Amino acid sequence: MISQSVSWWRVHEYVTECVGTLTDWPMAGTPAWCDLDDWDPRKLAAVLDAGQHHALRVETAQEARAQASKAISAAADWRGIAQELNQIREFRATRPWATRQAVNHA
């Protein structure tokens, strides 16, 4: 299986190397970017820059999900809850008469 983990820093290093000495370009997709010649190095730099911003969003979202997962894991005694649910399920399976039934008073 291929890892889905995203490293913004590695993308940033690659983009920095590719854009070289360029320091200014319009945001990808803007009218100023569209007006650039397709072979203008600033046009490619803008696309690479947009890619690194996307990688940053993905990486920060991954980190947020990991932190949320840890918080949820620590929020309750999940093993105890699972054991209790299994005990209730086993109790009801062996005592069908103890299962609640809906009553229609019509």
Image (tube, grey):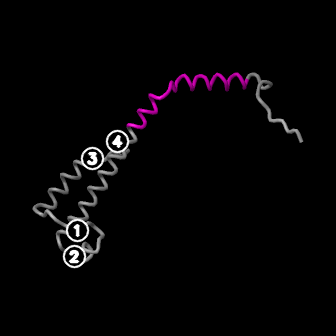
Q: Which mark is residue 57?
A: none
Looking at the image, residue 78 sits to the left or right of residue 51; the answer is right
Q: Quadrant of the C terminus?
A: top right
Which contiguous range is marked in magenta? Answer: 67-93
- The residue indicated by pointer 4 is 63
Which label's residue is closer to the chain start, 4 or 1?
1
Which numbered disc, 3 or 2, marks the residue that appears first in the sequence?
A: 3
Which quadrant is the N terminus positioned in?
A: top left
Residue 75 on image: x %, y %: 47, 29
Residue named by callout 1: 26
Of label 4 and label 3, which has the lower sequence position? 3
Residue 53 image position (x, y, % from top left): 28, 56
Residue that numbered label 2 is attached to: 36
Disc 1 and disc 2 in contact, CB within 8 angstroms: yes
Q: CA distance from mark 3 to mark 2?
A: 30 Å
Considering only order in the chain, which callout, 2 or 4, is on the residue closer to the N terminus? 2
The secondary structure type at the circle numbered 2 is loop
The span from disc 4 to disc 3 (Cα, nearest Å) is 11 Å
Q: Which residue is mark 3?
A: 7
Q: Is residue 1 above or below residue 27?
A: above
- Closest to the camera, between mark 1 and mark 3, is 1
Q: Secondary structure at mark 3?
A: loop
Q: Is residue 37 above or below residue 6?
A: below
Residue mark closest to the camera, 3 vs 2: 2
Q: Quadrant of residue 103?
A: top right
In the rendered image, residue 70, in percent from the top left (x then y), is placed at 41, 33
**Which callout, 1 or 2, points at the residue further toward the start of the chain?**
1
* Amino acid identity at mark 2: Leu
**Which residue occupies 51% across, 24% down?**
77
Give the amino acid at mark 4.
Answer: Glu
